[in-house]
Image (spheres, rainbow, N blue to C red):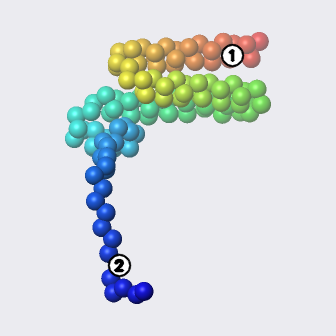
Amino acid sequence: MEFLNYILKIDNQNINIRKIDDKNTFTIYDDLKNYDYLNILFKFIDIFLLIYILVLFYYNNLKKFNFTNMNNIYFSLLCIIILIINQILKNTDINILNYSLIISGVILFSLIIFYIKNKYEQN
């Protein structure tokens, strides 16, 4: 059999339209338009953590030109822990005060470990 037109119409009443809740897909302009200042703060803290990791890399590896295996493992683990804790905290809908305190504590703890490591290497 041969038809002139092939038209198929399906009435589907079970279409679910969901709102996108992934905050990482929005730009800062979208967040400003939606008055989502918490997400803007998260993005600025992400930028700060990136700069912190770059500065840490400079002082840990480049300044002394120290690319030993143990030093690279130390730096990699420290950065991975900082980034994982940051992502876990952002995805738990924590309030901003607790988030800021925990991130500050993690950065302070990493600086203490960095200081102790440098003192240990000098002796």
Give residue 85's position: percent from left, percent from top. Answer: 52, 23
For mark 2, what is the residue? Answer: 6
Q: Is residue 73 left or right of residue 28?
A: right
- Taking the spot 60% from the left edge, 32% from the top edge, the residue there is 58
Sequence order check, earlier mark of 1 and 2? 2
Q: Amino acid at mark 2?
A: Tyr
Give residue 73's position: percent from left, percent from top. Answer: 71, 28
**Relative to 88, residue 122 above or below:** above
Asked where in the image residue 94 lies, by quadrant, the reply is top left
Q: Give the total of numbered labels.
A: 2
Question: Which mark is nearer the camera, 1 or 2?
Answer: 2
Tell me the quarter of the image containing the C terminus.
top right
Q: Is residue 35 left or right of residue 104?
A: left
- Taking the spot 36% from the left edge, 85% from the top edge, the residue there is 3
For mark 1, what is the residue? Answer: 117
Give residue 34's position: percent from left, percent from top. Answer: 23, 38
Residue 121 seen in this snapshot: yes
